[in-house]
Image (cartoon, rainbow, N blue to C red):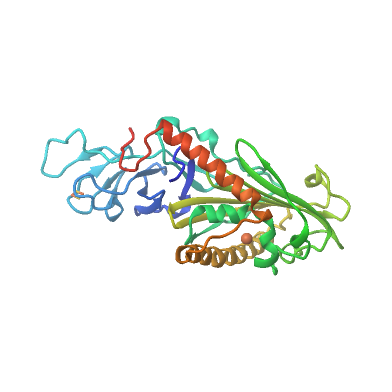
């Protein structure tokens, strides 16, 4: 039901401390733990003996010790110690997952480890550049299938109704979107001309009067979104508007990790060029504003899932659904292709 040969975000790197951290993704239980050299290991969260979650155990040096009878596992999932026994059965191992720390996030590969390439982790433009700042980033769980979230992230129109006090303004109700599908995902975008600067962005925009505004809503496979906003003075929209001397640019990175069919872990941070004065105030204000808006999305998405679950009547699609529907169709194709090549049942242990 989920694309497995892909990188997903398992957690913020900072969330993994001196205790094992349980996370659930793609219907599987995984435990993360930090080794003495600072790197993080990811193992199946079930002891090979009596299946106690290993996250209930403790870290012993570079090993993870089960909290029931003390079996110890290394970062590759191999059992290396059984109390009161000299013999360790060959099949005494749990699955381990490729893991990479990047952008402060821990990226996990849930599919065939032989196919994991860290070069395929989504690139974050301007990361570490002096003129750009990144928000601290945050996460939340949304009680819905991840495809309802990708629907939302390919739908610039909803800001007019869901986020009128932050991202939205009247121009967002009427301007049509252009849709482009590529090998990497789907993008819905539009330039709005001579529009008001939407409420959240007023404090960051460095010019007076009306603006031209780009909304670029792009979701890449399996479920990672780049939501780009560009504001330039009215009349200045162009292909290279981001380079305009007065441009305010915000790149919002949104990483969705399906927990199961009806829950999604949502991680995000934003890059912006608002030119913080060193206090971090602008970045913190942006982070607060974005989080408030995402909470508005969560209310809607939780209610959508609940309503689909309890309603037997059908639903319709309208013009604004083109991008979300295209993304769903392409996802299904990828899923079918993956399933035809690799056994993807969670019960089927892939080689470590
Ligand atoms: S259940 Fe883990 S050691 Fe027994
Ligand atoms: Fe939204």
Residue in front for this viewpoint, 301 or 203: 301
Q: Is residue 315 left or right of residue 231?
A: left
Query: In the image, what residue occupies the spot 38% across and 40% down?
Result: 97
Q: Position of residue 258 (x, y in %)?
A: 46, 51
Q: Is residue 116 left or right of residue 48?
A: right
Q: Position of residue 136 (x, y in %)?
A: 58, 56
Residue in front for this viewpoint, 217 or 320: 320
Q: Is residue 100 left or right of residue 248?
A: left
Residue 67 shows in the view: yes
Looking at the picture, does residue 224 appear above or below residue 278? above
Residue in front for this viewpoint, 261 or 169: 261
Residue farthest to the front? 313
Query: In the image, what residue occupies the spot 19% across and 49% down?
Result: 50
Query: In the image, what residue occupies the spot 19% across and 46% down?
Result: 49
Residue farthest to the bottom? 165
Q: Position of residue 140 (x, y in %)?
A: 50, 60
Q: In the rendered picture of this protein, how many numbered marks are placed on residues? A: 0
Residue 221 shows in the view: no
Residue in front for this viewpoint, 95 or 156: 156
Hey, which quadrant is residue 73 in on the image?
top left
In what quadrant of the picture does the C terminus appear? top left
Q: Position of residue 308 (x, y in %)?
A: 49, 62
């Amino acid at each position: 039901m989920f694309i497995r040969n892909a990188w997903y975000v398992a957690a913020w790197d900072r969330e993994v401390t001196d205790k094992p951290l349980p996370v659930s993704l793609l219907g599987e239980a995984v435990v993360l733990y930090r080794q003495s050299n600072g790197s993080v290991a990811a193992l199946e969260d079930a002891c090979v003996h009596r299946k106690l979650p290993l996250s209930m155990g403790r870290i012993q040096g570079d090993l993870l010790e089960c909290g029931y009878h003390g079996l110890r596992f290394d970062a590759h999932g191999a059992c290396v110690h059984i109390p009161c026994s000299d013999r360790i059965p060959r099949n005494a191992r749990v699955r381990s997952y490729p893991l990479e720390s990047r952008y402060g996030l821990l990226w996990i590969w849930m599919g065939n480890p032989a196919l994991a390439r860290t070069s395929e982790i989504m690139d974050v433009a301007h990361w570490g550049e002096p003129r750009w700042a990144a928000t601290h980033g945050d996460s939340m769980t949304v009680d819905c299938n991840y495809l309802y979230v990708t629907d939302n992230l390919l739908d610039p129109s909803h800001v007019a109704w869901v986020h009128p006090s932050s991202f939205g303004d009247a121009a967002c109700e009427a301007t049509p979107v252009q849709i482009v599908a590529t090998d990497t995902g789907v993008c819905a975008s539009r330039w709005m001309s001579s529009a008001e600067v939407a409420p959240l962005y007023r404090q960051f925009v460095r010019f007076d009067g009306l603006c031209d505004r780009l909304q670029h809503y792009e979701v890449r496979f399996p479920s990672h979104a780049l939501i780009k906003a560009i504001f330039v003075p009215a009349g200045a929209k162009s292909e290279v508007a981001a380079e305009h001397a007065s441009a305010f640019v915000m790149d919002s990175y949104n990483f969705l990790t399906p927990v199961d069919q009806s829950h999604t872990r949502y991680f995000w941070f934003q890059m912006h060029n608002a030119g913080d004065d060193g206090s971090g105030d602008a970045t913190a204000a942006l982070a607060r504003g974005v989080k408030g808006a995402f909470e508005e999305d969560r209310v809607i998405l939780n209610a959508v899932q609940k309503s689909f679950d309890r309603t037997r009547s059908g639903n319709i699609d309208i013009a604004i659904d083109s991008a979300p529907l295209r993304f769903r169709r392409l996802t299904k194709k990828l899923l079918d292709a993956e399933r035809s090549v690799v056994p993807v049942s969670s019960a089927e242990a892939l080689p470590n």
